Amino acid sequence: MSKKHSKLAKTLVEKILDQAKIPYTQYELVTQQEGDVRQLKLDELALNEHMIYKTLALTGKTSGPIIGVIPLDERISYKKLAKITGNRKVGMVPLKDLVATTGYEHGANTPIGIHQTHHYPIIFSNSAQNQTEILVSSGKIGRSIKVAPRELVTFLGAKFADITEDD
């Protein structure tokens, strides 16, 4: 079950969007502990999983860190992302290095906050282009924002590309 609250304290990401005059809606999502990370409790979401986007931190020898933003119900294609970013291959940033690389813990990575501090290349799945709104993390576990993907990609200097695995 997702909860929309207009009285939630604003995250840094939401303040960044306010300053840029980019409209968004705050969401608080139910999470649960799974091993050493917190995950969204998918069975309680009243939202289409394809509308919720996860922010993945990857790295390549040529490019260094890369941020991939894909639907929750899809998987990143290492081959496609490597080709797009000029790397021979890419891989996920190890969990132990995630905070040092992005500034966020697993489950709280947000393309907005990462862009503000690091300016890594950010690539959104092509599927986001076809949606009027998507949910991305607002920098805290269980907190998201609903935002227009084209406006977000323009603001971040990101791009759309085919970066998910084919079925």
Image (cartoon, rainbow, N blue to C red):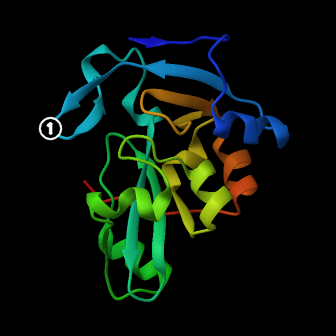
> What residue lies at 57% left-to-right and 56% top-to-bottom?
114
Of residue 127 and residue 35, the one placed in the foreground of this image is 35
> What residue lies at 64% left-to-right and 44% top-to-bottom?
149
**Residue 91 at what x, y percent from top left?**
29, 72
Left or right, 29 with reference to 133? left
Of residue 135 and residue 59, the one placed in the foreground of this image is 59
Q: Quadrant of residue 38?
A: top left
Left or right, 58 with reference to 156? left
Left or right, 98 with reference to 159? left
Is residue 78 visible to the viewer in this orientation of the structure? yes
**Residue sitting farthest toward the left:** 35
Q: Measured along the vertical axis of the image, is residue 164 above or below residue 38?
A: below
**Residue 128 at what x, y percent from top left?**
54, 46
Of residue 42 and residue 36, the one placed in the foreground of this image is 36
Left or right, 85 with reference to 93? right
> What residue lies at 65% left-to-right and 34% top-to-bottom?
147
Q: Amino acid at mark 1?
A: Gly
Question: The residue tagged with tag 1: helix, strand or loop?
Answer: loop
Q: Measured along the vertical axis of the image, is residue 29 above or below residue 77?
A: above
> What residue lies at 53% left-to-right and 30% top-to-bottom?
144
**Residue 66 at what x, y percent from top left?**
47, 69
Report which residue position mark 1 lands on. 35
Q: From the image, which quarter does the N terminus lie in?
A: top left
**Residue 49 at what x, y percent from top left?**
37, 30
Is residue 162 visible to the viewer in this orientation of the structure? no
Of residue 37 and residue 92, the one placed in the foreground of this image is 37
Q: Neighbour class for label 1 at 10 Å: few (<14), some, many (≥20)?
A: few
Q: Quadrant of residue 133?
A: top right
Q: Measured along the vertical axis of the image, is residue 166 above or below residue 108?
A: below
Q: How many numbered tags mark residues here? A: 1
